Amino acid sequence: MKQKVAFICVHNSCRSQIAEALGKHLRADDFDFYSAGTETKPQINQDAVRLMKQLYGIDMELTQYSKTADQIPTPDIAISMGCDVGCPYIGRAFDADWGLPDPTGQSDEAFLRVIRAIEERIKAL
């Protein structure tokens, strides 16, 4: 049985959504991937959506939405995306904190740095 990996950040609208999408795209045979937050947003970050479509042909809005940690299966591995916007609490310690900056409101280059860092870390799982 595949391990469940959850990517957690506060709003579940950008970094964790990118990680879920890339996990499913790159490593679906190895793990089940989820994302969640301690709060939700009405939509996924539109810059993330645009860039993920351009780079990988992934339309996150077709298969993903902002959700809280109680709406996903209990993960075997819980990864915090970074606490620069506040550290989420999910009832247990994280297995890893990737410490990625939130690119929201920044340039495409900032998004691309985060996307590439997530891609490399998913490949290394």
Image: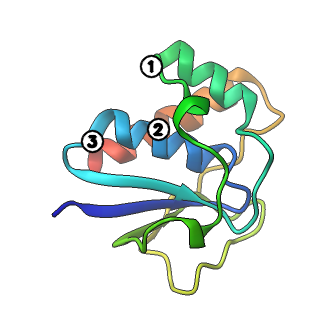
Expressed as whole percent of the image width and height from the top left, the position of residue 38 reads 70, 69
For label 2, the crowd category at 10 Å Cα-Cα, with few meaning under 14, some 14 to 19 and many 20 or more, is: many
Residue type pointed to by label 1: Tyr
Residue type pointed to by label 3: Arg
Residue designated by label 2: 21
Expressed as whole percent of the image width and height from the top left, the position of residue 92 reads 52, 86
- Which residue sits at x=27%, y=42%? 28
Residue designated by label 1: 56
Q: Secondary structure at mark 3?
A: helix
- Residue 125 in sight: no
The mark nearer the N terminus, 3 or 2, is 2
Q: Secondary structure at mark 2?
A: helix
Expressed as whole percent of the image width and height from the top left, the position of residue 46 reads 74, 28
The answer to whether mark 2 and mark 1 are in CB contact below 8 A is yes
Q: CA distance from mark 2 to mark 1?
A: 10 Å
User: In this picture, is 80 found above or below 66?
Assistant: below
User: In this picture, is 109 found above or below 36?
Assistant: above
- Residue 46 in sight: yes
Q: CA distance from mark 3 to mark 1?
A: 14 Å
User: In this picture, is 42 found above or below 81?
Assistant: above
- Which residue sits at x=78%, y=39%? 104
The mark nearer the N terminus, 2 or 1, is 2
Q: Image quarter for residue 1?
A: bottom left
All told, the count of numbered labels is 3
- Which residue sits at x=79%, y=50%? 41
Q: Secondary structure at mark 1?
A: helix
Residue designated by label 3: 27
Q: Image quarter for residue 71?
A: bottom right
Q: CA distance from mark 3 to mark 2?
A: 10 Å
For label 1, the crowd category at 10 Å Cα-Cα, with few meaning under 14, some 14 to 19 and many 20 or more, is: few
For label 3, the crowd category at 10 Å Cα-Cα, with few meaning under 14, some 14 to 19 and many 20 or more, is: some
Q: Which of these two is toward me, 100 or 14?
A: 14
